[in-house]
Amino acid sequence: MPPIKLDTPLQYVKGVGPRKAEGLAEKGYARVEDLLFHLPFRYEDRSRFASIDSLRPGDKVTISGRILSAVLKRTRRRGFTIFEALVEDDTGAVSLVWFNQPYLRDIMKSGRDAILYGEAGLSRWKGRSLTMENPQYEIISHDGSEAIHTGRVVPIYQRVADLSPRMVRAIQHTILANLEDPIFDPLPAGLSFGEGMMPRGEALRAVHFPPESADLDDYQNSRSPAHQRLIFEEFFLLQIALGLRRQGEQKETRTGLATTPEMKEKLLSVLPFKLTGAQRGALKQIVDDLTSVHPMNRLLQGDVGSGKTIVALLAMLLAVENGKQAALMAPTEILAEQHHRGIASMLKGRPYRVQGLTGAMTPASRRPLLRALEDGYVQILIGTHALIQDKVVFRDLGLVGIDEQHRFGVVQRAALRGKGKKGATPDVLVMTATPIPRSLALTVYGDLDLSIIDELPPGRRPIRTHLRAETSRAKVHEFIRKEVAAGRQAYIVLPLVESSEKSDLRAAVDMAAELSRGAFKDLVVGLIHGRLSPEERDEAMQRFAEGEIQVLVGTTVIEVGIDVPNATVMVVEHAERFGLSQLHQLRGRVGRGEHASHCILLHGEALTEEAMQRLKVLEESSDGFRIAEKDLEFRGPGEFLGTKQSGLPEIRIGNIIRDLPLLEKARAEANRILEEMRARPALPVYGALLLHMKRQWGERLGFMDVG
């Protein structure tokens, strides 16, 4: 067949065709290069041959021999077939059995030589004689062509679309055997880290079909020279993409906001307390951005209760003092409502006009608000994703704040940023109470400046965390009763809203009713979950905040948006079902007052070792960053952030935890190249790199500017 190029559509590759290509395209594999970066997830050493007389039940081995006989048997069970073959070598013979593979009669013919790999066992039909069921096979062609499925170190692939791992292996081999040479290499010459690095084409061939000299342990752990070369390339290109995005933003200039000592004093006078040192440091970085000639694009990161919202409020007020408007978007109506109440209360009697906007508002109450917003009367608008609707028009939006930003899709964040005046990009401050490990910050947020509030306000007492099996529930309830008797309050959090036949989880609705009738029948038990109306949630929150409700049962809507200093107990049912960062956030709902607080993680009896290790991290540490690192290790970046909503750049082969040193080297090299490109933009050596970046990242780059 003619030489295959990297950009050849997969439908033209032998073994694919139009129908399979359509399924591959739906999974993101349209061109040859796309499939080449679908790497094996493990390797099997099938290169060592065993003699048939040495086989013992349970042995996983490769054998080589001649097919003596082969027969297809149809059974009484409709559509069920058994294909049997007998293979011999110089030491003996063994029977082979395949189920429901009738096409093998055209492959495994008597007289042919074959290599087979599988597990030896005792036959279920022939007097428990030795057999191999469903072994991998390869017919020896004697034409000099290499074996690809057996008789070597064999790559094992994840299934793609309707292609089996064996089919993927055969197609990859066809591509690599016919791929044009030399293969285009996007890495520019002169990379200091790249000296001595394996060429791209050689790396692609070796990573799919390791040479005989390959160290299998290195391949299994992605430490082989081939893996390291391709991982470095992926990280380098990602960092170039993020850097180009950042440079694009820095080209945009505007008149920065003005600030004076009098204005600073006026803004700080709004606060009923002094800022912590960490808050002051973060605020200075933000103000420096707001007063610069380039739009701000900053991530404000801080643990639960560290005071991010206060810092964001001061930034919004600075925008207002400069005649601009500000918007604060939160992921849930509960959190948006709490922000609105808290900020409106703090600004009461001050000359600032704050309004809330959620999807639950009636058209009649919404219309005058939208008119006031468009006229510029509303200076600060706080709400949910309702803020990005087409009918929401600002007169002059200067600052966009996004709370718990990892819960929003990238399109939603871009839509809010796009509500500035034509040609005037608003400053953007995204916030998260989920500590972001450095490795993740270098990838997902590599185009954002980072501010960290790593200090809690004075008076916050440490929270004691306890792991308890669910058989201890009665003792936990007794402990809650003691706390309530002392005047305190408690949360009980469950992962579901209502019972499901497919789940053994205790639902919040059932739990609240059960506790009201039983353990807490003489206490006031409240219920809060995402399916209540905003009015019902607001009422429950208000009653709990005022102390009328003593035990609040709910789902993870409690994770954000409720701040009750008198609450001292957080009980999480089925804690093993939550991520560590989410448990840490739930724990942060208590410990906000002067009293000692406790977080009790109830778990099932049959915990896996990994699940117990995860929960022990919470028991042993209150450091949000350490917890986030461990959470990332256990769950991976997609699940850590929520794959669909995270805006996570596509990382196909690298692992940002395992390969962090390589990521940091790639970042350093990318920054050096970006500086050279900025200083000498016409240098032709970078033309090929930029063309590759446009093809690889062009569509995604449009979204990466919003984190």
Image: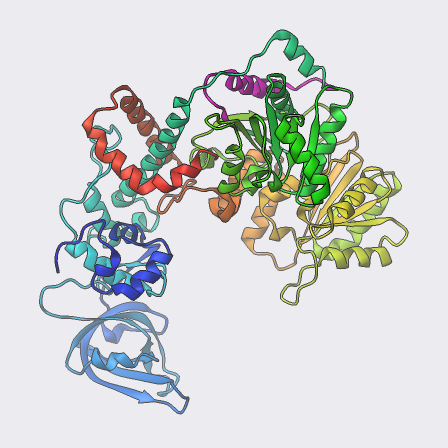
Image spot of residue 657 (x, y percent): 43, 40
Q: Residue furthest bottom?
A: 76
Q: For the point 25% across and 64% down, which residue is it?
A: 17
Q: Residue furthest right?
A: 522
204 falls in the magenta region? no
Residue 456 sits in quarter: top right
Q: Is residue 471 left or right of residue 681?
A: right
Image spot of residue 523 (x, y percent): 88, 49
- In terms of depth relative to the viewer, which is nearer, 389 or 11? 389
One can see residue 214 in this view: no
Q: Residue furthest left?
A: 143
- In terms of depth relative to the viewer, which is nearer, 229 or 324? 324
According to the image, what is the colour scheme of the structure?
Answer: rainbow
Q: Is residue 349 left or right of residue 161?
A: right
- In terms of depth relative to the viewer, which is nearer, 225 or 555? 555
278 falls in the magenta region? yes
Residue 186 sits in quarter: top left
Q: Is residue 341 left or right of residue 521?
A: left
Q: For the point 48% across and 46% down, which residue is it?
A: 638
Q: Which residues are magenta?
A: 271-298
Identify the image quadrant of the N terminus. bottom left
In this rendering, the answer to whether 118 lies above or below 544 is below
Image spot of residue 687 (x, y percent): 22, 32
Q: For the point 21% across and 25% down, which residue is it?
A: 683
Image spot of residue 330 (x, y percent): 62, 38
One can see residue 417 in this view: yes
Residue 545 sits in quarter: top right
